């Protein structure tokens, strides 16, 4: 699995505007996508992990955009509900989908 952050996650708690997670198979990405992108999972992953970035104040699942495209998961947390960021993430998803074989 490879992960590419548009901006690195810093210990300051800053979240990147988009994250691309590349799995070795579409099946593995699908399994992770089905079970991994819920508020409970975000909270569970952040607990007991001092090196993990904690959920930002005011975290809301409605601000998460997530897509599974072939063997890739693209997700974004739009903390300020910026329509420009939403449009850019949706465009990235469309371009990824178009290049998926």
Image: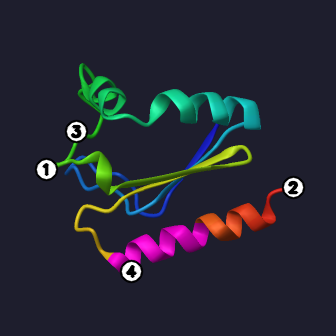
Instruction: Identify residue for label 1.
Output: 58
Tag in front: 1 or 3: 1
Tag in front: 2 or 3: 2
Q: What secondary structure is found at the residue carrying circle 2? A: loop
Q: CA distance from mark 2 to mark 4?
A: 28 Å
Q: CA distance from mark 4 to mark 3?
A: 25 Å
Viewer-nearest residue: 60 or 45: 60
Instruction: Identify residue for label 3.
Output: 54
Q: Residues within 10 Å of mark 2 (few under 14, many from 20)?
A: few
Q: Residues within 10 Å of mark 1 (few under 14, many from 20)?
A: few
The relative height of residue 73 versus residue 1 in the rendered view (above or below) is below
* Residue 78 x/y as whole percent: 32, 62
- At horizontal 22% and vertical 68% (from top left) the residue drawn is 80
* Residue 26 x/y as whole percent: 75, 38
Instruction: Identify residue for label 4.
Output: 84
Residue at the far front: name it: 62
| Marks 2 and 3 in Cβ contact (< 8 Å) | no
Res 97 quadrant in image: bottom right
Residue at the far top: name it: 48
Q: CA distance from mark 1 to mark 2?
A: 38 Å
């Amino acid at each position: 699995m490879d992960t590419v952050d548009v901006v690195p996650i810093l210990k300051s708690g800053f979240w990147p505007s988009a994250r691309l997670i590349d799995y070795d198979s579409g099946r593995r990405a699908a399994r992770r996508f089905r079970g991994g992108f819920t508020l409970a999972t975000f909270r569970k992953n952040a607990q007991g992990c001092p090196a993990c970035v904690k959920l930002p104040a005011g975290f809301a699942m409605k601000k998460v955009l997530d897509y599974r495209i072939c063997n890739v998961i693209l997700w974004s947390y739009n903390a300020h509900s910026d329509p420009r960021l939403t449009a850019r993430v949706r465009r990235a998803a469309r371009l990824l989908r178009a290049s998926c074989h």
